[in-house]
Every structure is written in structure tokens, then in C-alpha cells.
Amino acid sequence: MVGLLKAVERFDPTLGVPFAGFAVPTITGELRRHFRDATWAVKVPRGAKDLHVRIPNATAELHHELGRAPRPAELAEHLGVRLDEVIDALDAANAYRSASTDTEAGAAAANHAAARRDDPGLPADELLLLKQVLAELPERERTIVYLRYYEDLNQSEIAAQVGVSQVHVSRLLRRILRTLRAAL
């Protein structure tokens, strides 16, 4: 209905295009926008959502070429994007539908996430290096990293605590992660 209303509001009969020819793409676009933006269980950046949609075709093409499942680095090269973008897009698939912790699979996933949170799984020397690099970050950036990766808050919750917008938190997290990757 929203797409139809938008089509009615924006239709210009003086352009010589029949209403149906204008309304169908407008309605289709509104439906796509709804499913892209409103059906995810967790807030995922639009770029990751868009790339997530492109990955299955790229995977099929590369699987046909290589005779095996492609690695994320091969997907990144094929799609012309960075490896971390492909990894984010692959992770986005997990955010599309959430699993209840009342189910066996959901409880297993929650236990796995809790175990990862308590044990970063890094060798002692790498953990020490990570702590040193984190200590060199400005206080606000350390706080954001702590809230995101230790308290498991989403970007909106972090924004409320830090006093900036969710979009700014997203930008800061990307910049912080680039800084950490470069330092490590």
C-alpha cells in the first residue's frame, strides 16, 4: 500500500508514461526496501546486506570455475571488495533470523558465544599485544570497543551511552578496527 501511495503521489501524467508502467517499479522497489530494511533480526549495515545478496551467485560462479567451494579471499577478489567486507556480509546471514535460546540449537549458539566472550582464544603473546594496542587507543575508542566486544552492546546502545549517533558509532568501530588491524 505504501508503494502504491508513493506511486500516486509522484506520478506525472504529462510525461506520457502509463500509470501501471510507473506504479509497478515503484511498488516493487518499496517491497524490496521493506524486506531489506525491516526483516533483519539485528541491525546490519546496508553495505553488508547488499553484499550478502551478491555472495550466493559469486559462490556458484567460483564453485563452477574452481571445482570447490571458494574461500572468502577468492570471493572478495571476484566481487571486487575487501576481505573484511565479505566476512561481514557472511556474518550478516546470521543476523537475518535470530534463534531462540529456548531451542537446543539456540542454547548451543548462546553457550558458544558466551565461551568465546570469556576466552578470546588467542595465544598469550597475541593477547598481550592486543591489550597493548587497545591501551594506546583514546579513552572513548577503548570504551566503544569494550561496550561492543565485552559487554556485547549493539551500536544503538553504545551510541546512547557514549552520546553520539548510531551511524557515528558504526564509523568509529570501522576506523578502530582498521587501526587495530594495522597495529597488529
Image (cartoon, rainbow, N blue to C red):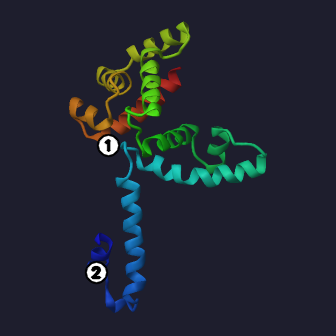
Q: Nearest the camera: 102 or 123?
A: 102
Whether residue 88 sits left or right of residue 39 in the image: it is right
Q: Nearest the camera: 137 or 130?
A: 130
- What is the secondary structure assignment of the residue under circle 1? helix
The amino acid type found where label 1 is placed reads Val
* Residue in view at x 31 percent, y 83 percent: 11
Q: Please tell me the numbered disc located at residue 124.
A: none
The amino acid type found where label 2 is placed reads Val
* Residue in view at x 43 percent, y 84 percent: 21
Q: Nearest the camera: 113 or 78?
A: 113
**Relative image position of residue 19 (x, y in whole percent):** 36, 87
- What is the secondary structure assignment of the residue under circle 2? helix
* Residue in view at x 67 percent, y 38 percent: 71
Whether residue 160 sits left or right of residue 100 in the image: it is left
- Picture quadrant of residue 95: top left
**Relative image position of residue 111 (x, y in whole percent):** 44, 23
Whether residue 58 sits left or right of residue 28 in the image: it is right
In the rendered view, tell whether residue 132 sits above or below residue 58: above
Decide: few, some or many residues near mark 1? Use Cα within 10 Å; few <14, some 14-19, many ≥20: few
In the rendered view, tell whether residue 177 sits above or below residue 26: above
Residue under pointer 1: 167
Q: CA distance from mark 2 to mark 1?
A: 32 Å
In the rendered view, tell whether residue 25 sits above or below residue 59: below
- Picture quadrant of residue 75: top right
In the rendered view, tell whether residue 47 sits above or below residue 33: above
In the rendered image, which quarter contains the N terminus?
bottom left
**Relative image position of residue 121 (x, y in whole percent):** 52, 16
Q: Nearest the camera: 102 or 41?
A: 102
Which mark lies nearer to you, 2 or 1?
2
Residue under pointer 2: 8
**Relative image position of residue 116 (x, y in whole percent):** 46, 20
Decide: few, some or many residues near mark 2? Use Cα within 10 Å; few <14, some 14-19, many ≥20: some
